[in-house]
């Protein structure tokens, strides 16, 4: 079985998760698997007891991308991989991991997945979700306050200090590496339909 690896990038709150869910629903659990780059965040212990509020989690160095690359290489060979499980409440990976096997389609989602050249070259299809900055910050506020126990003030402070500048420095420029750019976030049904058809075409060529 040939494995198709798809990268879905875009700013925080751009709608990557919505696009990913639509693709996974189209191809089903037996044929598709999701890996989130966020699972590869480094443990807080690697920062020498630095206060999490002072750590730039939006910089490429905050993620162990080399491990993700190794896992994708194994999956591409038909082997399994042990994916880390990151606990945002303690800023560390859990002791247990998530074992996944190779499927026909593997989707890798994350804001910084097109930054690293070695990782970027593993993708058979690169998709960038392009969403207005105001919409992205509102989505991030909702997500972080409802799902990650953050306060609105802390989310806004982090956005100003690291999220926005890192987006401009690292995330936004990676649009140039993408094969498909989806405007207006994950609600663009026509664009998602184009993506699904592109994936099916690539599968047939494998």
Image (spheres, rainbow, N blue to C red):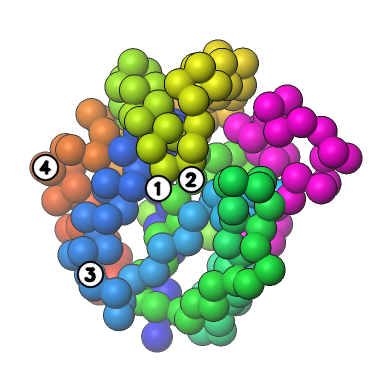
Residue 158 vertical placement versus 55 (above, below): above
Relative image position of residue 94 (x, y in whole percent): 65, 63
Q: Are marks 3 and 1 in contact (CB under 8 Å)?
A: no
Q: Are marks 2 and 1 in contact (CB under 8 Å)?
A: yes
Seen as rendered, the residue at the extreme left is 190
Q: Which comes sooner in the sequence, label 2 or label 1?
A: 1
Disc 2 designates what residue? 110
Q: Label 4: state its secondary structure.
A: helix
Q: Nearer the viewer, residue 203 or 49?
A: 49
Q: Nearer the viewer, residue 191 or 93?
A: 93
Disc 1 designates what residue? 8
- In front: mark 2 or mark 1? 2
Q: Which comes sooner in the sequence, label 2 or label 3?
A: 3
Q: Which comes sooner in the sequence, label 3 or label 4?
A: 3
Disc 3 designates what residue? 27
Q: Are marks 4 and 1 in contact (CB under 8 Å)?
A: no
Q: Residues within 10 Å of mark 1 (few under 14, many from 20)?
A: many
Task: Determine the CA span between mark 2 and mark 1.
Answer: 7 Å
Relative image position of residue 191 (x, y in whole percent): 18, 42
Relative image position of residue 27 (x, y in whole percent): 22, 69
Name the residue at 51% across, 17% down: 153
Task: Determine the CA span between mark 2 and mark 3.
Answer: 20 Å
Quarter of the figure that contains the C terminus: bottom left
> Which span of residues is magenta-colored?
43-69
Q: Residues within 10 Å of mark 2 (few under 14, many from 20)?
A: many
């Amino acid at each position: 079985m040939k494995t198709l690896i798809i990268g879905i990038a875009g700013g925080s709150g751009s709608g990557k998760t919505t696009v990913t869910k639509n693709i996974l629903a189209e191809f089903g659990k037996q044929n598709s698997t999701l890996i989130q780059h966020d699972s590869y965040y480094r443990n807080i212990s690697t920062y020498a007891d630095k206060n999490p509020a002072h750590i730039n989690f939006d910089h490429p160095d905050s993620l162990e991308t080399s491990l993700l690359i190794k896992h994708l290489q194994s999956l591409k060979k038909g082997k399994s991989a042990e994916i880390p499980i990151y606990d945002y409440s303690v800023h560390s990976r859990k002791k247990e991991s998530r074992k996944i096997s190779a499927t026909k389609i593997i989707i890798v989602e994350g804001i910084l997945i097109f930054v690293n050249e070695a990782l970027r070259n593993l993708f058979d299809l690169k998709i960038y979700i392009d969403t207005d900055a105001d919409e992205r910050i509102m989505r991030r506020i909702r997500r972080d306050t409802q799902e990650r126990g953050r306060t609105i003030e802390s989310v806004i402070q982090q956005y100003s200090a690291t999220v926005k500048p890192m987006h401009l420095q690292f995330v936004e420029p990676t649009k140039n590496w993408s094969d498909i750019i989806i405007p207006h976030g994950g609600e663009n049904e026509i664009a998602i339909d184009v993506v699904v058809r592109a994936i099916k075409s690539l599968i047939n060529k494998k």
